[in-house]
Image (spheres, rainbow, N blue to C red):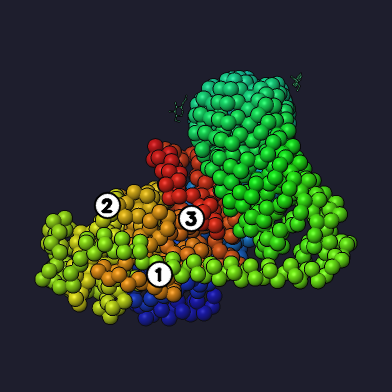
């Protein structure tokens, strides 16, 4: 402090009258503040470091008054800053806005901030701050907006926040901390202006204060995940006519619903009501039908609610999600539920419901998830589900369902999860159903009375990750075709009557982790493929008639119980094999076979690499079309392309001046420019030095671009090609690339999640066109944010096809050089394709460019946008990649990630999302799921770009209304 004052005195001598005392004071305070902060080089603080030359009012993040002598706003949100918050900020006496959110600030909040008497907005959310919230913040009489969410604060909420005159408070967010105690609001202190009160995920206790009923402007109330108790606050909500969102889940609220719902009928704008995970009892009152017609989501799950489901619930015509699971609801499912046409997700699992599954569910055309599991439903599975084209998850397990598996289920082509287990379903597996090749993720039909042989058509389910057929009466042999279900990670065939040999194809499944065939009648040897599998972790062969010597090293006896014919010297408690010589004799042929297979593979690969037959076919197409003459005199005069000379390009870009440079990539530099007719262009110039290496790639880009037209793919204006100069002229994309928007230089994110979804949808459509509809099928090969350009309206356009390759019949052909039949063979081809972090893992194994590789890159892009972590930042994920890191969090630990995603981007203001945080939440969850599916290690289990584009378009459409 003392040196600070000496500095102050000295400086005022030097600067004389140029700066007044206020200005000097603010500048010094800012320097003190920044001395406690570190940031990455090139970050927003760059202008601060040149502080001697630049006036502080021109430093990034600062807004001054008109006289340029005092700081009014200090906004350094999302700038990756580290350090502590210096009390010196409190010397910025005219400060109205202090926003340090989304950084890595540590330590406590300096109590001196409470003396900033003009402060209206204080945002410190999403940092690493800890300690108590200083009671001095209660002195801030003009404070309107206070956001302290997602830190590590503890202790009580200071009384003064509501009482000491902060009656102007409109927004209070202390969510996601460890704050305890009551909400300190009593009759004497009011929060009349309060519109948003967000306190979720803390350790708050007590009742919701009665005084809140005077905060009649409240729109959002989020009490979720605390320890609040008492009856649901009827007296409060009956006054809150502006309420849109009310979250009270996961607390200790008790009592019944009737009076509370009566109170809520005064809130005509209510869109979301969450009361899950409390101790609510009694019936669902008929008055539920009088709740706001704008209600979109209703969560009453995990309570002690009993009685029947009132048919009046169907008056809530706008409901898209209804969750009544895990209560004591009985009686039958009312048919009236089917009148809720907008219903997308219906959960009534884990209740005491009896009777039939209403046939009319088939009319709820938007239904994507239906969970009726764990009830006492007694009927057959309705045939009408076949009309539910959006159905993704159908959970009917643990009921008393009878009859057979309806063949019509095969028409639910979007099914991802089907669980019919623990019922009394009988008959065969219908072959049509077994062919449901679109089923992804999960099939469970265990614990039923199904019989007959396993249809070999099950092999078509090659996207299913887990299959449980256990505890039925299946007989016959295990079809070796099951080895085609290559996505399988878990396969359970136990407790059936299967006989014969175990097919070795199953042991070769590349991702199989658990496999259970216990309690069957299988015999013969356990195939070597199971011993040599590197993925299998849990195996159970018990209680069959297997025989022979086994050489598993990592398994215990309990995997082999009840197979008297098995022997091994490697497993304790198992009989040792009598004839050890036999073992070696067996092994030799196996070794030989492996050798032979390896040789065969190598032999069969060689012709693939050098295959020139089909290549010739392609080069013909190209040698006809692609004549980019090296000679300027012969420059192509295509009618579609205006002719632009080198000279004109020189003029447009001011002689390729460095001030026109807007980017540089692997193949050269990109300049912006303006043509004489005022067309704004980007000129991609291939650097002369690298010309030799680049020629083929340049021609490729031209070729691909020329043949392909789509609104989401860059349009070529013209090509300029001379022996010593090659350039592509493209329209200038005013809004730069997605890279610029995800990682802006000033650290301030301006693109919001709705825009990002639109961009992703555009990208998906561009790629889908390239893969499926373009005159020449092309894999983009280098999808990453810097290759996604944005036009004036923020529509995305894909660029950089420089390394795109032809795709034909999913098998990729190399781009032949024009007029030259010799194949381009490069040992590091895999490296050439794509950028680190976005390259599909199979490329490292010698696989060539493919559309599945693009799908992978798209998945990475999705996960990158969700996490705002670059896939190249390996250290962030503890030596794994973005996919594995998120997959390990899936699904239980995703909540904080999703909440962070929503915080990462500016708030969205549009109709679909306004006042509806859950929409964003669900969307982000969906993006993560899609990202994980796209980045599966096995290329063949990834969706196609058409599927992905469809999914993204659905969100885009939904958000645009
Ligand atoms: C801030 O920068 C602009 C442009 O460089 C300059 O015109 C202005 O005078 C600067 N403001 C102050 C207060 O120095
Ligand atoms: C609401 O405000 C009125 C007048 O300001 C006051 O008399 C009353 O006690 C308040 N009600 C509650 C429940 O605090
Ligand atoms: C559903 O919500 C929309 C928009 O909130 C509203 O316009 C419409 O009236 C609602 N539908 C019903 C049946 O109330
Ligand atoms: C449903 O439960 C209520 C009590 O919660 C009981 O009175 C009623 O008889 C039950 N109905 C059926 C059909 O079991």
* Mark 1 vs 2, N-terminal side: 1
Is the N terminus in the top left, top right, bottom left or bottom right quadrant? bottom right
**Near-viewer residue (224 or 934):** 934
Quadrant of res 882: bottom right
Q: Secondary structure at mark 2?
A: loop
* Ligand number 3: quarter of image: top left
Measure the C-alpha gap from mark 1 to mark 2. Answer: 32 Å
> Where does label 2 land, which residue?
709
Question: Does 946 sit left or right of 657 as displayed?
Answer: right
Left or right: 362 in relation to 791 = right
Question: Tags 1 and 3 in contact by the CB under 8 Å rule?
Answer: no
Query: How many angstroms separate mark 2 from mark 3 (CA)?
Result: 24 Å
Q: Identify which residue is drawn at 58% across, 42% down.
A: 457
Residue 476, given in percent of the width and then of the height, sits at 71, 42
Q: Is residue 541 above or below residue 920?
A: below
Q: Position of residue 483 (x, y in %)?
A: 61, 52
- Residue tagged 3: 859
Local crowd size for mark 2, using a 10 Å CA cut-off: few (<14), some (14–19), many (≥20):
some
Which residue is drawn at the image coordinates 66% and 22% (left, top)?
356
Q: Please say if 517 is above or below 287.
A: below
């Amino acid at each position: 402090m003392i040196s600070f004052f000496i500095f102050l005195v000295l400086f005022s001598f030097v600067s004389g009258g140029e700066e007044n005392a206020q200005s000097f004071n603010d500048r010094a305070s800012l320097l003190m503040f920044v001395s406690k902060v570190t940031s990455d080089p090139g970050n927003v603080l760059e202008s601060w470091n040149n502080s001697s030359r630049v006036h502080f009012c021109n430093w990034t993040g600062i807004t001054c008054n008109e006289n340029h002598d005092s700081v009014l706003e200090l906004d350094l949100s999302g700038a990756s800053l580290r350090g502590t918050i210096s009390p010196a900020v409190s010397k910025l006496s005219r400060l109205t806005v202090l926003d340090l959110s989304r950084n890595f600030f540590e330590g406590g909040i300096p109590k001196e901030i409470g003396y900033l008497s003009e402060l209206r907005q204080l945002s410190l959310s999403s940092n690493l701050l800890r300690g108590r919230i200083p009671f001095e913040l209660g002195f801030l009489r003009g404070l309107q907006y206070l956001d302290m969410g997602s830190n590590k604060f503890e202790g009580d909420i200071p009384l003064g926040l509501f009482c000491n005159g902060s009656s102007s408070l409109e927004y209070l967010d202390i969510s996601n901390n460890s704050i305890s105690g009551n909400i300190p609001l009593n009759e004497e202190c009011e929060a009349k202006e309060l519109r948003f009160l967000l306190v979720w995920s803390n350790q708050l206790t007590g009742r919701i204060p009665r005084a809140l009923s005077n905060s009649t402007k409240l729109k959002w109330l989020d009490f979720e995940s605390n320890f609040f108790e008492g009856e649901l606050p009827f007296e409060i909500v009956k006054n809150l006519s502006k309420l849109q969102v009310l979250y009270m889940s996961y607390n200790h609220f008790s009592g019944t619903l009737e009076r509370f719902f009566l109170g809520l009928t005064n809130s005509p704008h209510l869109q979301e009501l969450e009361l899950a995970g409390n101790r609510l009892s009694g019936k669902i009152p008929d008055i539920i039908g009088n709740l706001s017609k704008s209600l979109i989501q209703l969560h009453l799950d995990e309570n002690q609610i009993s009685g029947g489901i009132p048919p009046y619930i169907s008056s809530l015509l706008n409901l898209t999600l209804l969750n009544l699971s895990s209560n004591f609801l009985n009686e039958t499912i009312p048919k009236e539920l089917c009148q809720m046409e907008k219903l997308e997700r219906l959960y009534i699992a884990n209740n005491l419901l009896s009777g039939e599954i209403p046939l009319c569910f088939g009319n709820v055309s938007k239904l994507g998830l239906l969970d009726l599991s764990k009830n006492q439903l007694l009927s057959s599975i309705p045939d009408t589900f076949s009309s539910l084209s959006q159905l993704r998850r159908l959970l009917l397990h643990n009921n008393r369902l009878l009859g057979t598996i309806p063949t019509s289920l095969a028409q639910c082509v979007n099914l991802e999860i089907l669980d019919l287990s623990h019922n009394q379903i009988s008959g065969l597996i219908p072959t049509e159903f077994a062919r449901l090749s679109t089923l992804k993720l999960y099939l469970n039909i265990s614990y039923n009375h199904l019989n007959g042989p396993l249809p070999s058509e099950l092999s078509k389910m090659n996207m299913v990750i887990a299959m449980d057929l256990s505890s039925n009466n299946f007989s016959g042999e295990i079809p070796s075709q099951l080895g085609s279900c290559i996505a399988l990670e878990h396969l359970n065939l136990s407790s059936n009557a299967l006989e014969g040999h175990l097919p070795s194809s199953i042991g070769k499944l590349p991702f199989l982790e658990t496999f259970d065939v216990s309690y069957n009648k299988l015999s013969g040897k356990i195939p070597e493929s199971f011993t040599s599998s590197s993925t299998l972790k849990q195996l159970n062969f018990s209680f069959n008639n297997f025989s022979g010597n086994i050489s598993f090293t990592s398994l215990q006896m309990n995997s082999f119980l009840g197979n008297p014919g098995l022997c091994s010297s490697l497993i304790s408690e198992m009989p040792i094999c009598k004839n050890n010589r036999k073992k070696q004799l067996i092994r030799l042929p196996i070794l030989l076979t492996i050798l032979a297979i390896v040789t065969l593979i190598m032999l069969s690969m060689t012709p693939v690499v050098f295959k020139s037959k089909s290549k010739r076919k392609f080069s013909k197409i190209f040698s006809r079309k692609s004549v980019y003459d090296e000679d300027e005199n012969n420059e192509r005069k295509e009618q579609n392309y205006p002719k632009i000379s080198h000279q004109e390009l020189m003029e447009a870009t001011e002689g390729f001046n460095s001030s026109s440079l807007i980017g540089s990539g692997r193949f050269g530099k990109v300049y912006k420019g303006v043509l004489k007719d005022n067309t704004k262009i980007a000129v991609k110039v291939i650097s002369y030095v690298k010309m030799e290496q680049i020629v083929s790639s340049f021609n490729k880009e031209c070729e691909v671009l020329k043949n392909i037209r789509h609104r989401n793919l860059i349009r070529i204006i013209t090509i300029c090609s001379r022996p010593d100069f090659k350039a592509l002229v493209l329209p200038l994309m005013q809004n730069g690339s997605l890279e610029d928007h995800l990682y802006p230089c000033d650290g301030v994110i301006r693109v919001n999640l709705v825009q990002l979804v639109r961009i992703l949808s555009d990208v998906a459509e561009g790629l889908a066109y390239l893969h499926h509809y373009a005159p020449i099928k092309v894999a983009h090969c280098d999808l990453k944010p810097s290759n996604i350009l944005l036009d004036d309206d923020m529509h995305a356009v894909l660029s950089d096809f420089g390394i795109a390759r032809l795709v034909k019949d999913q098998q990729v052909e190399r781009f032949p050089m024009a007029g030259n039949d010799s194949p381009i063979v490069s040992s590091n081809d895999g490296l050439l394709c794509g950028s680190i972090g976005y390259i599909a893992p199979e490329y490292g194994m010698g696989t060539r460019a493919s559309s599945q590789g693009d799908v992978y890159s798209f998945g990475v892009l999705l996960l990158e946008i969700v996490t705002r972590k670059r896939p190249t930042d390996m250290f962030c994920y503890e030596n794994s990649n973005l996919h594995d890191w998120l997959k390990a969090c899936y699904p239980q630990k995703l909540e904080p990630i999703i909440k962070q995603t929503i915080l990462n981007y500016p708030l969205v203001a549009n109709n679909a999302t306004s006042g509806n945080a859950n929409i964003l939440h669900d969307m982000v969850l969906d993006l993560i799921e899609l990202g994980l599916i796209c980045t599966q290690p096995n290329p063949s289990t990834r969706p196609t770009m058409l599927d992905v584009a469809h999914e993204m378009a659905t969100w885009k459409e939904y958000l645009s209304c």
